[in-house]
């Protein structure tokens, strides 16, 4: 079969977007899994962190499903939602839409450019859940907020939150960021372990002053990524709860792929939280490929059209890289 797709990224977190609303594809669940494994392979495939499938919704403007590069399905993806949001907004001629995801219908809005010439979108990140059974995390308590878990570390504190995909977050210093500790912990909780039967995204967060964070994430099903939208959102939330940053105020969140803005809001009615993630949705190329559904790794590129949007994003990325090298990797611990 022939498939049309778009290669895109949010903060360097890259995806292949496949539109099932405008095309008559009939993918089974195994097909989606196999396509993700084959096409996202960075050695033999097109290379990506995952595939964004855009489908019709019975009650929203569109439905998004996200399959990671290992074939597993993610319940949500903030960076991917920005890309889907842009695609659907432009397809429908709207600047505000509602996208159905696995756990919630989420608002997407076109907003002012995050950097000169870089299209930006604001996406709603919710629901926010602290109950450990929602991750799930097996621990003899209801919540985990800025506490040590001895099996993970004898000196780091962790917070667990689902937004709705699961995150384990630790605020650390520069020495820890430079070490291999995050890799060791992330590989442990995403392998056979007693705490997280389904694995978990692991983020180490370094405050860079009021209103600024650096977030590095090991994504379950992917590994270390340039950025994880829900992780940056969850990390901003935790920073506000720890009174490092303020509710209702825009926080600049830096990552290895660039930066985003996050705003955390709390409802006075039920004391619940909603996070708004604001960042780029950049197109790299569109392509037509021919795929054998039984052997998707043996695909053929039929046509490829490059976009020129990445040039402007490279300027932002270079500026962020220079800033992070100065503030984190080449500076003495503060």
Image (cartoon, grey):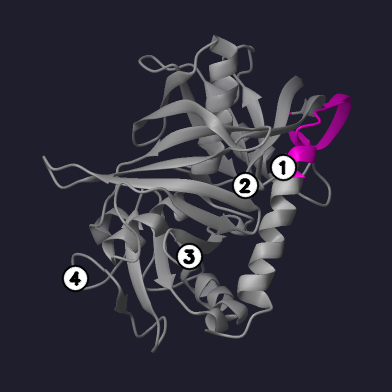
> Which residue is label 2 attached to?
11
Q: CA distance from mark 4 to mark 3?
A: 20 Å
Q: Is residue 28 visible?
A: no
The region drawn magenta spans 293-314
Magenta stretch contains residue 98: no
Spot the residue most to the left: 269
Q: Earlier in the sequence, mark 2 or mark 4?
A: 2
Quadrant assignment for the N terminus: top right
> Which residue is label 4 attached to?
141
User: Mark 2 falls on what kind of element?
Assistant: loop
Residue 202 disc label:
3
In the rendered image, residue 297, in percent from the top left (x then y), is placed at 79, 40
In the rendered image, residue 13, in percent from the top left (x then y), is placed at 63, 47
Q: Is residue 296 visible?
A: yes
Q: Could you classify mark 2 by the number of other residues whose Cα lies within 10 Å: few (under 14), some (14-19), or many (20 or more)?
A: many
Q: Earlier in the sequence, mark 3 or mark 2?
A: 2
> Which residue is label 1 attached to?
313
User: Mark 3 falls on what kind of element?
Assistant: strand
């Amino acid at each position: 079969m022939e498939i049309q797709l778009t290669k895109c990224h949010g903060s360097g977190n890259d995806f292949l977007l496949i539109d099932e609303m405008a095309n008559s594809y009939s993918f089974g669940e195994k097909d989606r899994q196999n396509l993700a494994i084959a096409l996202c392979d960075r050695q033999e495939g097109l290379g990506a962190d995952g595939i964004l499938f855009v489908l019709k919704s019975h009650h929203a403007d569109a439905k998004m499903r996200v399959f990671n590069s290992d074939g597993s399905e993610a319940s949500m993806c903030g960076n991917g939602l920005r890309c889907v949001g842009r695609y659907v907004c432009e397809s429908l001629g709207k600047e505000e839409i509602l996208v159905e995801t696995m756990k919630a219908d989420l608002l997407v809005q076109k907003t002012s450019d995050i950097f000169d010439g870089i299209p930006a979108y604001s996406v709603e990140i919710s629901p926010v859940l602290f109950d450990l059974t929602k991750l799930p995390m097996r621990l003899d308590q209801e919540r985990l907020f800025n506490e040590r878990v001895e099996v993970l570390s004898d000196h780091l504190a962790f917070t667990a939150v689902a937004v709705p995909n699961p995150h384990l977050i630790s605020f650390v210093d520069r020495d820890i960021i430079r070490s291999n500790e995050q890799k060791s912990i992330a590989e442990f909780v995403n392998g056979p372990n007693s705490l997280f039967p389904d694995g978990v995204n692991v983020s180490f967060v370094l405050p860079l002053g009021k209103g600024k964070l650096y977030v590095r994430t090991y994504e379950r099903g992917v590994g270390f990524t340039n950025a994880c939208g829900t992780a940056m959102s969850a990390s901003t939330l935790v920073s506000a709860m720890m009174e490092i940053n303020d509710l209702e105020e825009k926080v600049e969140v830096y990552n290895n792929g660039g930066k985003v803005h996050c705003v955390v809001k709390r409802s006075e009615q039920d004391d619940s939280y909603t996070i708004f993630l604001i960042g780029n949705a950049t197109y790299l190329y569109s392509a037509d490929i021919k795929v054998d559904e039984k052997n998707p790794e043996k695909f053929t590129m039929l046509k490829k059209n490059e976009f020129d949007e990445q040039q402007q994003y490279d300027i932002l990325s270079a500026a962020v890289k220079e800033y992070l090298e100065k503030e984190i990797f080449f500076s003495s611990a503060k």
